[in-house]
Image (tube, rainbow, N blue to C red):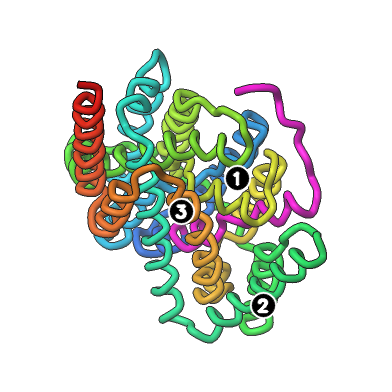
Amino acid sequence: MEEKVPLKFNVSELAGAFGDFGTIIPLMFAAALVCHLNLGMILLFFGIWFVITGLYYRLPVPIEPMKVVAVVAISSVLAGPELAAAGILLGLMFFFLGFGRWMEYINRYVPDPVIRGIQLGLALLLLKSAGEFMVKDPMFFAVGVALILVVFAISYLGKIPDVSALVLILIAVLIGILINGIPEIYLLQIPQSLVIPSPGDFFRAVPELVVPQAIITVTNAILATSLLSKDLFSHDIPPRNLSRTIGVMNLVSVPFGGFPMCHGAGGFAAQYRFGARTGGANIFAGMVFLAIALLFAGPAFQELISPGFYGALLVFVALEMGKHGLKTDSYVTTFVTGVLAIFSMIAAFLAGMAIAYLLIVRGRKKQKNMQT
């Protein structure tokens, strides 16, 4: 990184701290419920690493669940040891890729339009998820969108920080309390033993979790996040640094019941969209997760906020992500990659790479013919 960014702890940073909650909370609450995971331990490590990342990078580089792992876990009802196996393998992979010049080589040979396509694909997937939340609770979805628009308009016209995410979360919690009452204190349940995967867990995790997640982590969590740090802050976060922190987070957390984690361009854009400009937002977010993990990570809290409010947040996160995905010099590559990403990240990446290099070769031939 370049010079250190001074940390700020103001209303704008506090609002930005909630920018990625619409992605993190629904995925983690659903995974914990469906796969019978310890939600308290999951949120505990999110809190710890949010704080550490804010202090280390000094920018609002988010901590997110590994989306492929989360979605497959929820849809296939995977057990904790298999998820732990994926997290450990991915942790080892990215820790070692963070040394030497591996990430620089990968960055050199993965064209920007492919990365932008992955960003666009994630935006489309977020819109799809928002639609699913809307179907579950259309009234609260509409209320959430309206609230965000009103607060955004007030902040824009009044030249004050956009605190729409913070306002929406507070209103959602208040409505949940009015409907369901204040959730009871639920102290963190510390596991009695480490999560030790069997050889079979490691074997099964490779094709269904590790390979597809590695592709999205390299492109979105590392390369796209690094690229976005230049777009948003004019600061260079080297891909190798992001790779190392992803490795350390998973190797330390997953055996103790943490969920596989990474960074993410979508969360980076979301926190920026709602006001975050320094690592202070991460520290705020970490404190919130730590408080929930230690005191409230029980079933009652999971049902407190209506799904419609999460869907409203996802819409605006998707728009921010899509906006950056469109900053491309090859719309063909980016759009094909983005659309295919809805169905398969592996297919999207391979197709995007093929199209990008075909266009590069075609451009070189055209240039050579012009010279002759």
State the image quarter where residue 56 is shown.
top right
Residue 119 in the image: x percent, y percent? 41, 49
Residue 38 in sight from this viewpoint? yes
Within 10 Å of the Cα at label 2, are there few (<14), some (14-19), or many (20+) other Cα atoms? some
Residue 133 pos. (x, y %):
44, 74
Amino acid type of the residue that numbered disc 2 sits on in the rendered structure: Ile
Alpha-carbon distance for marks 2 and 3? 23 Å
Residue at x-position 25% and y-position 43%: 352
Mark 3 is on which residue type? Asn
Mark 2: which secondary structure?
Answer: helix
Depth order, front residue of 200/148? 148
Residue 297 spot, x, y in % from top left: 56, 59
**Is residue 296 left or right of 91 when viewed as pictured?**
right
Tell me which corner region of the image, top left, top right, bottom left or bottom right, holds residue 358: top left
Quadrant in which residue 104 is drawn: top left
Specify the segment rendered in magenta: 1-28
Seen from the viewer's position, the closer of residues 268 and 338 is 338
Residue underneath mark 2: 177
Q: Amino acid at mark 1?
A: Gly
**Given the current orientation, which residue lies at the most extreme top position?**
100
Disc 1 from disc 2: Cα separation: 23 Å
Callout count: 3
Q: Is residue 50 visible?
A: no
Vertical position of residue 138 compared to residue 5: above or below: below
Residue 352 within the magenta-colored segment of the rendering:
no
What residue did someone put label 1 on? 47
* Label located before the other in sequence (1 or 3): 3
| Residue that label 3 marks | 38
